[in-house]
Amino acid sequence: MTQQSDHNKLKTFVPIPARPAPGASNSWLAHLRQQYFSTVLSSALTVTTLFLFYLLMSPLVDWALVKAVWSAADRKECYSVSPDGACWAGVIHWFNNIIYGRYPSPEIWRINLVFVALVLWASPIFINRFPHKVMVFLSLWLAFPGLASYLLLGGEHGLLTQLWFGIACAILTIIVLALIWLVTGRELAPGHSALTRLKLPLLALTIGACLGQQWLILEAVETTRWGGLFLTLVIASVAIMMALPIGILLALGRRSELPVIKYLAITFIELVRSVPLITVLFMAVTMLPFFLPNSVELDKLGQVLVAISLFAGAYMAENVRGGLQAIAVGQTEAAKSLGMNYWQNMIFIVLPQALRLMIPNIVTSFISTLKDTTLVSIIGLFDILLMAKNMAIDKKWLDLHTEPLVLIASIFFVLCYGMSQYSLYLERKLQWSH
Amino acid sequence: MKSTSPQKTDTSWSWHNPVLRAWFYQCATIIIVLLLVYYLGSNIIENLRLMGLPFGFDFLSSTASFDIGWTLIDYRPDMNYWRVYLVGITNTLVLSLLIIVFATVLGFLMGVVRLSKHPLVAILARAYVEIFRNIPLLIQIIFWFVVIFLELPKPKHSFAIGEAFFLNNRGFYTPELLTDSPLLMVLLATVVVWVVYWLLPRGLKSTKSPQQQATKSLAMLATTGLKWLGYGLMLYVVFLIFSGNFEWVNPEKGRFNIEGGMFLPAAFCAALIAMSVYRSVTIAEMVRAGILSVDQGQKNAAQAIGFTQWQTLKLVLIPQSARSIIPPLINSWLTIVKESSLAVAIGFPELVSLFMQTSLNQTGRAIEVVLMVMAFYVVTSLLISGVMNQVNKRMQIQER
Amino acid sequence: MESLTKEHNATAIALKGINLWFDDFHALKDIDLTVASGEIVVICGPSGSGKSTLVRCINHLEQYQQGQIEIFDQSLANKKVASQIIRQDIGMVFQHFHLFPHLSILQNCTLGLMHIKGMEQQQADDKAMVLLERVGVAELAEKFPGQISGGQKQRVAIARALVMEPKILLLDEPTSALDPEMIKEVLDVMIDLAGSGMTMVCVTHEIGFARRVADTVVFMAEGCIVETGPAQQVLGSPQWDRTQEFLAHVVSNGAA
């Protein structure tokens, strides 16, 4: 082409400079108009929703805050002071019951201690810089119950339980030390050097904790006195902790190529998923005694824990199955070509990846299980809902129905909404890291 | 086993032989399961013997001798436990069906509202979803029952709508239609209409291949089904009017109570409202996700052809989102049937309350009762799952 | 083919001073363009230059903040008029076809006829079949979009647009999503269309098509129109360096 001769005659293109968009620096008034009043329909909606909001919120605020009674000796007094207002005084009086159930008051520090220990133990999982998150999680899963059961149940224990408690104490100490390390700005070495230095002190601590139990026997608190939010959280946590391994086993069974195992797994999963939880709970309470020999007696809490764990496990199995399917078949083939057998492949290659994908699902499962624990109130376990309902039978607070329900509804809302937002955050984080 | 390992398949009697391993695992599992069954079974037999309760379903023919607050079918205390079982099933199904209808309608509405871009509407819709989703259903049911329905005025001072509807703290009263022609006639009329439709010349002259007719759009199928049902209902109403075979019974204020008409107890109403609202949230999210999942380009294409917003929604977006909405929708219907059992907490006489609580307590036959109740839920579950599989299959045919 | 009611030398599309912002990004800057009735205009340019955005403004798929668009001397500013014009006078073909997957090929074409033009089923079917034959996919009428190839899909998309009897056809990179073997079949249909006197505004990288069929070529970069003129001139001896640069790249990449 005649490019060379035309080259000198080509005009240089200079793009028109970009200008700011019109209306970008407009006043907030114009912005308001655009968002809320841009069309007739839009304006109508704005007005209607504002009106609806006012209609709903003003009596609510009136009842809950403006006319509410915050301190009174009993219902009658509340009523005489302010008949149209909420009687929060009753809820405040009963607050300890709603949170801790009928746990003896002087022993409540044990529940708080367990909670603090749990928070400390679990915090490494949420801190980005902390390594070995999987180890921490596994230790939480395996060792923490030793600590918790000792503190919560009290009473005398056999040697094995004491050992369990001792190991739990040791691990908790390691984690707390690591956290302190982190907080004081030092980098966490892979841990080995620190651990080897601490080997002896830790051993001493473990033995000390075991022996300490001989002297420091805590007052035994039977599970029938457990209740309130404390019991709800115990049931939900145990259920989810047990549901994970049950779900993984069932999911693996379902994907198995061995027909016997596969159909057993499918039958169990489908049966459990076809029936409502309340029937499983009723079944556990009425039928489990039939299944066990006369010598073994499981208390009601135990029955309920078994039932809910199996139930949650069947649903978890479906979640795990989704996670397993999402991990490319290529991963398994790569593992096989390295010479791994089925279990090695599963444990080291597939499951870690699948579980990581499923963490948001697991959080969602936990939220469901937490909401489902309210069903134990129907069979007479004193979870937070039954405590709230029992307030209305208390002579001093007869017929006080609404306030405790509102309180526990708010508690659940805060917990569940918080966790669901966290799970959304996790999902986004996981998306980016993939 | 369909192993693709690079080594030659070992056929010897060693542990490395995958076929042998498979057989071993399976035999081991069967043996373990059989042992477990034997262990549990012998425990059961021993315990039953100790308690003096033989296993058997003969208790079903003994008299129940307790009253039930609300039944759809006839029931008197001198009827047997089998009748109680049937009452429980019908009550559960009626409650579930009504919840399904209300929850689906409310859910679709809220789903579309959730799509609004108006900031205030979006906030309100989001608040609706988050509030009713994060509070446990049982708490919501108890709230509606205890805080709302039991706080309604006593029968003497009932709320009245016109002269025919009454609302008080015992429940809701509506006029009742008494007729000798049962509602089965509606189904009969529907079948008649359907047959006539297919026999019409238009149906015969269709030039489309049989395969095409079989793959009619799912949404079109649903709407035509509803259309026929509508025609059937109209035919039934006409028939009723002409035969004069009906009577409206209005509830009336008696001396202490409202008498006559149809009575829906407060527990029923509370359970209905609470569970409909709770499920509507899940359905709303489904609808919203479904419509959002349709490619934006489809909207562009429809706009370019010249369809209005409403036409685009009706002809392009909704048929395509139906694909992703319908399977989880049917799943949530199944969940509704299961969740209806929570009405036991407020005393509504559905299956769990009547059979698993009252009857079990009276007869002590835990195993038989549990088996029967589970059987109902398992069968219902299988039926609904079966429907969903059929629906899925039809949609697969259509796509490829 | 039915005669389209247009007069030669009437202005089909007039864009005056179009400016468009996406949030703070100034996507179209002071665009002025006139398309005469029956003219074939090809818009080309590097990605991000705003070509698709410009074409989508014409049938209101994108909202511009400043400027004026007139179709056959009727301003698009009035919403009611605009939607009527768009329905009757403008058709569009998309890069990713956007066929309705839940309807058969025939139904894709007849949907608009039945619901917008109110035709009877039989009449709509006949009319659609004529166009499907014209683009060469008549035998696919009963199939679904998921069952046919990309080239066939795009030809159906063209038929679907044509069946509404538009006076102007907009094409947004119609061959960019196609495998190389299928580009030719779609280009053949477009060339055939161009020969029939349709007003076309086509965004494309197919310089060969432009050379063969276009009356005017518009070259855009960074939201502005760099150069517009007769195809031979812009493609053969461009006046701006930016155009030259682009054409050199296109040729060296084998798209001729």
Image (spheres, coloured by chain):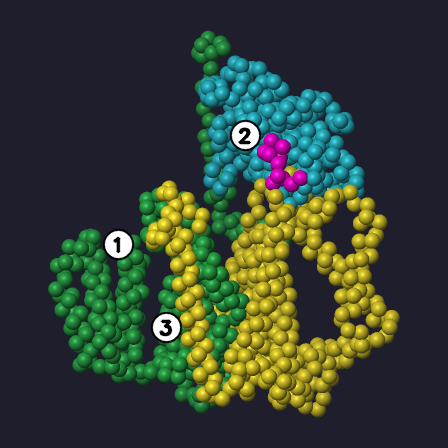
Task: Label 3, secondary structure: give it.
Answer: helix
Magenta span? C143-153
- Residue count near mark 1 (Cα–Cα under 10 Å), binned few <14, some 14–19, many ≥20: some
What amino acid is labelled 2 in the image?
A: Asp
Tell me where residue A29 appears, x and y as whole percent: 51, 51
- Residue A355 location, quadrant: bottom left
Q: Is residue B151 left or right of residue A172?
A: right
Chain for disc number 2: C
What hue represents chain A?
A: green
* Separation of marks 1 and 2 at Cα, in angstroms: 48 Å
Q: Is residue B78 magenta?
A: no
Tell me where residue C250 appears, x and y as whole percent: 49, 22
Which residue is identified by label 3? A234
Which residue is identified by label 2? C179
The answer to whether residue A425 shows anywhere in this view is no
**Placement of A45 over or under C15, stated as above or below:** below
Callouts 1 and 2 in the same chain: no
* Separation of marks 1 and 3 at Cα, in angstroms: 28 Å
Chain for disc number 1: A
Q: Nearer the viewer, residue A49 or A25?
A: A49
Question: Which residue is located at x 38 percent, y 67 percent?
Answer: A242
Q: Which mark is residue A131?
A: 1
What hue represents chain C?
A: cyan
